[in-house]
Image: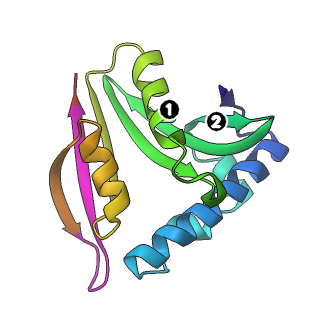
């Protein structure tokens, strides 16, 4: 079941952070770069980020999260995270499908991921996103930006 998460609620913010940290640790291992901002997030930062959060629950347990910001007719996916113990169960796809079909008036969705995060890159391409650009953040980190038009 997918439902909106009130991130200002302390318990909810802790639950999201408990998905985010293990999920981004896996990404850090994949891209061999551990200084990524999501690993430094705190409950307070999550509560103040201004993103809308939606969670995928299995038997009442939060197992995946997507967060977005919308400006005009553009949706920016800030996080699409699944707890590692729930990898390969289609949760990321269900969360993506949910926001695509439940948010009205969107003409474009944008998202970025570590360029070396091949599972994420493949996921976005498989789901209709096109590579827009690759940005070199530093010697060890590049991000790939994607866009999907409707």
- Of 129 and 67, the residue lying toward us: 129
Q: Quick check: can you spot residue 32?
A: yes
Residue 101 found in image quarter: top left
Assign the magenta stretch its main secondary structure. Answer: strand
Q: What residue did someone put label 2 on? A: 56
Residue 51 found in image quarter: top right
Q: Residue furthest bottom?
A: 139
Residue beneath the point at 54% across and 65% down:
24
Q: Which of pointers 2 and 1 lies earlier in the amino acid sequence?
A: 2
Q: Residue furthest front?
A: 89
Residue 106 image point, x, y percent: 33, 20
User: With 148 as the anchor, is 67 left or right in this view?
Assistant: right
User: With 119 as the anchor, is 108 left or right in this view?
Assistant: left
Q: Is residue 62 above or below residue 102?
A: below
Say whether residue 65 is magenta.
no
Residue 60 image point, x, y percent: 81, 35
Q: Which residues are magenta?
A: 136-148
Q: Quadrant of the N terminus?
A: top right
Q: Quick check: can you spot residue 36?
A: no
How is the structure coloured here?
A: rainbow
Q: Is residue 136 above or below residue 32?
A: above
Residue 94: image tag: 1
Say whether residue 142 is magenta.
yes
Are the residues tagged 2 and 1 within 8 Å (C-beta)? yes
Residue beneath the point at 21% across and 66% down:
135
């Amino acid at each position: 079941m997918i439902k909106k998460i009130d991130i200002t609620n302390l318990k909810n913010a802790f639950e999201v952070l408990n998905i985010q940290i293990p999920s981004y640790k896996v990404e850090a291992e994949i891209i061999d770069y551990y200084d990524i901002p999501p690993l430094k997030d705190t409950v307070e930062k999550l509560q103040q980020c201004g993103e809308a959060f939606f969670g995928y629950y299995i038997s009442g347990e939060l197992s995946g999260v997507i967060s977005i910001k919308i400006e005009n007719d553009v949706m920016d996916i800030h996080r699409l995270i699944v707890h590692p113990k729930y990898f390969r169960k289609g949760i990321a796809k269900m969360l993506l499908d949910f926001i695509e079909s439940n948010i009205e008036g969107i003409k474009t969705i944008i998202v970025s991921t570590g360029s070396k995060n091949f599972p994420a890159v493949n996921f976005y391409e498989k789901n209709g996103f096109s590579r827009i650009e690759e940005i070199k953040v530093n010697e060890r980190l590049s991000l790939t930006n994607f866009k999907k038009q409707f």
